[in-house]
Image (cartoon, rainbow, N blue to C red):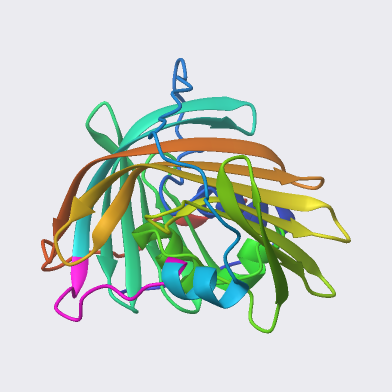
Amino acid sequence: MHRKNPVEQPTHIRHALVSVALALTALTCLIPAAGCGNKNATDAFAPPKQVRSVSFLKNRSQFEPDKRLNNLLLRATLEGSGDGQEIRASANIIWIRDSVIWINVKKFGIEGLRVLINHDSAFVVNRIDRTYAALPLESLMAQYGVPGGFDLLQDMLIGSAWFLPNMEMTADTMDGLHRLQGETWRYQAQYGIQEGLYRWRKGVFTEKNAQDQLFLGFDRFQNVDLLGPFPYFRRLDARSMQNGHFLLNITFTEVLPNGAETYRFEIPEHYSPMGK
């Protein structure tokens, strides 16, 4: 992959943040769109019959996909709003296990963004403006008070619960779900876990000093080969005092285990750093 040296400046960071922080899936706030739906999906499920222990809920809601699953090819529709714009687009997503998340976003069949996320960095190419960004992933996510990096994004994509290391937690029930909650010196976290299925339904991460919050929702579970119950509907709601409010609904239309053989990502020589 050819890479230029990025230029760090406030506008550059903000534009890249708009593209990546909503992400995992969309990264589409740089693409103008007319109209934005707000469709909530709702699966019927039974409420908890008893309060489960913290260790039981953590062990059941965290999972490793089948060892034979090396990658996923996913297609999705995206609807949302943020940074004064409304979003409606489509996306192709490639996940390479423990390695890479690649995203291609299209509007009216025309590619607008291409994104590559690895353990260390997030790279964004804006085809419309002919610009690019390259940023450290964890510092970028910290702009929205998100306490993780690639591991969190990977778990969000496959639907496995991600827990802050060394966080003391308590367990009870709330709103028809098992609830896990806890905090560290910097973050507060809540998890809503469905009875029986024991999959992550809701999540809230709060950065206490800045009061930045990320709300996550998972719904429309269907079984996927080598992966198990997979939430075909996602909601990401990011609220930041510094960077504003972004809302994204993701509906996966196709999930193909081991369907991604290759991907392409390059930054053209004539593209300029975002913000210049």
- In which quadrant of the rendered image does the N terminus lie? bottom left
Q: Name the quadrant containing residue 116.
A: bottom left
Task: Indicate whether residue 68 is drawn in magenta.
Answer: yes
Q: Is residue 276 above or below residue 46?
A: below
Q: Is residue 206 visible?
A: yes
Residue at the extreme right of the image, as rendered: 209
Residue drawn at the location 73% of the way across and 55% of the way down: 10
Residue drawn at the location 20% of the way across and 81% of the way down: 67
Compare residues 209 and 61 and report the one nearer the observer.
61
Compare residues 13 and 227 and report the one nearer the observer.
227
Q: Is residue 138 above or below residue 113?
A: below
Residue drawn at the location 45% of the way across and 19% of the way down: 37
Compare residues 137 and 212 and report the one nearer the observer.
212
Residue drawn at the location 42% of the way across and 59% of the way down: 198
Residue 61 coordinates in the image, percent (x, y): 45, 66
Residue 4 coordinates in the image, percent (x, y): 45, 71
Residue at the extreme bottom of the image, as rendered: 166
- Relative placement, left or right, of 207 versus 6 is right
Residue 224 coordinates in the image, percent (x, y): 18, 55
Q: Which residues are magenta?
A: 61-71
- Relative placement, left or right, of 232 versus 20 is left
